[in-house]
Structure formats: structure tokens, C-alpha cells
Amino acid sequence: MVEPNPEPGQPPLRIRPLRERKNLVRKEDFAQVLPPVDGFLRWFEALPDIYGAKALKRVVDAIVTARQQGRLVGVSLGAHVLKVGLSPLLIDLMRRGLIGHVATNGASAIHDWETAYQGATSEDVAQNLPDGSFGFWRETLDALNGAAVRAKTRGEGYGEAIGRTILDGDLPHRQLSVFAEAARLGVPATVHVAFGCDITHMDPGLDGAALGAATQRDFWTFADSVGRLGGGVWLNIGSAVIMPEVFLKAVSIARNRGQLGDDFLTCNFDMLQQYRAMTNVVQRPPKEGKSILAMHEIVLPLLHQALLCTAAARGCLVEPR
């Protein structure tokens, strides 16, 4: 399919149907959600109280305590977290009230929508880049950029508009969508777009003003949540630049408003220690910050099960909504 290009004198763009694309990630490979497993908490508590294991135990304790006290637990995500099949675990934590805000970048929204639509995501960039087909997929562009127009029309944030688009469209794998589940539950899910970073920005039909307004609305929703972070926990998982920068600005807004001190815990989960995540999340804002170096697809299932078992042991684990 040939798409007209709005720039005079430029060749038209070729945009193909999504069914022609090879996907590297399938829903069959996603993490499975288990209830509290007998004996897991004993195993978890037997880990050494040293370095990463000690930090993970502290984070689990802080999250369960925060929820017992009605405090906010929020999560910032990089797109890789969803691409490696962890959305079922995040959804379960939202359903149980253990996550009260999800914030992420534009790439996460793309993976989330594609998974809900076709049960698969993640194209082979190395294969598609040489002929210029990388990123030019009709259904993905229409849906994500259509969500920006919906947000403009209905006064929604970008994350909510994406979730509502998935729910209203009754997409076949919507149960795997973090944004759809957040919309259903009324949990804020915000998308913080860096223009030019996402394939959806290559669509000549994109309404840039609508997208900008939608992601700006999400930024202020995010700032409002951070303003309620006192006594709570914020996790940054797999975002090295965008979400640490957004978090730092939201902290400054909250303190400018007189809403936030430093009485909260943060933790950065990633495969590498990156400067912005360490300074903007772990070191500068909170009284207590942790960093756990691990692969997401290993540590997040451990975190999920530890949270369920710890909450169950304290008598505060709720059934999924």
C-alpha cells in the first residue's frame, strides 16, 4: 500500500498490512500467573541478606507495607519489560491493588496494542530496516495514532485512550494488555512520548498536536500521582533515560506544590546500571533508594511471587478484581 507523503517533492511511503510481518514475540511464551506457591516464602526468606537479595527483600517489604497503609506503589516501565512477556504479572498486581500507577514510553504502548490485537509483537528490525519496511505497519499506525485523536476528542490521556481503544474494539487478546486492564480498573496508565522515537511517528497521517496534547495530559496525571508518593514506593523497571527524566520532573512539581518530601522508597531494576536511572530515581529524590541488577524476565516473576506470598502471610492479599 502506498501512502501519500505530506512533504512536497518526496516519494510516497509504502505502508504494509501487519499480517505480512514476522514477529519475534508470541503470547504463548509469556509469563504465567501463579497463585502464592507453597514453600516459596520460606525459600525467599532463606536468600542471603546481602547485596541484591537483601535489596529485593527490602523492596517487597516496603511495597506490602505501603499497600497495607493505603500508600501509592507506582511503576515506570521500559518497553522491553512488556516485550519479554511480563504483562500478565503486572496485570495481576494491578488487579490485586499492589500497583496503583503504570507509566511508560511510546514503544511500550505499541507492544501492548500489538499483543492485544494479534497475540504477538516485536518485528525483526535487522531484517526489515535494509528495505525501509521497518515500522510501516498499517494497523499499528492507525490504532495508536487514532488513539491520540480519540484522546483529543474525549479529553483523555494517551494511555487511557489506548486502553479504551483496545476495550471498545474487543481485541482478541485484550486480557494481555496492561493499558486495557488499567482502563478497566481505573488505574492511571500514562504514556510519555519522546517525539521521533516511535514507529507511529513515521505515519504521515499522524496528528502531532493531538499526540502532544494527549501525552502532556498524561504527564500531569503522572505528576499528580507522584505528589501522593509519600510513604509509598516507586519502581523504575528497564527505562534508562525517558522515565527517569520524567520522574525527576514530576518530583520537582510535587515539591514545588508542597506535596512531597523524601519519605518514600525507590528501586531501579535493570540489566545494567545507567546514570540517569541511578541519579534521578535511586539517589536524588528519595530517603531510601535501591538498585537491583538482573534480567527482567527472571527478577520480576520472583518479585511477583514474593509480593503475593508476603501479602498472604500478613493477611492482606486480596483476590484479583
Image (cartoon, rainbow, N blue to C red):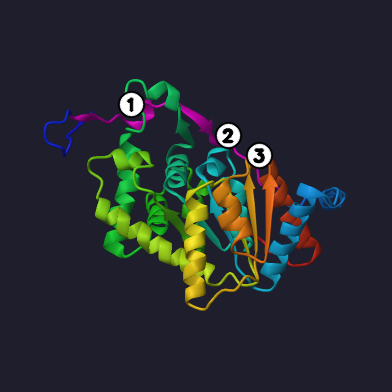
Residue 291, position in %: x, y?
68, 51
Measure how far apart labels 2 and 1 are at the Cα level. 26 Å
Residue 8, position in %: x, y?
11, 36
Q: In the rendered structure, which disc, 2 or 3, sits on the residue that comes first in sequence?
A: 2
**Which numbered disc covers residue 133?**
1
- Residue of label 3: 295
Image position of 278 (left or right of 5): right
Q: Residue at x 33, y 38 (%)?
A: 139
Furthest-bottom residue in this view = 258
Measure how far apart labels 3 and 1 are at the Cα level. 30 Å
**27 or 79: nearer the viewer:** 79
Image position of 306 (left or right of 204): right
Q: Residue at x 31, y 56 (%)?
A: 212
Q: Disc 2 or disc 1, which is closer to the eye?
A: 1
The local secondary structure at tag 3 comes to loop
Amino acid of disc 2: Glu
- Residue of label 2: 28
Measure how far apart labels 2 and 3 are at the Cα level. 20 Å
Q: Is residue 313 located in the magenta-colored stretch of the structure?
A: no
Residue 197, position in %: x, y?
38, 42
Q: Is residue 317 visible?
A: no
Q: In the rendered structure, which disc, 3 or 1, sits on the residue that comes first in sequence?
A: 1
Q: Residues within 10 Å of mark 2 (few under 14, many from 20)?
A: few
Q: Is residue 84 visible?
A: yes
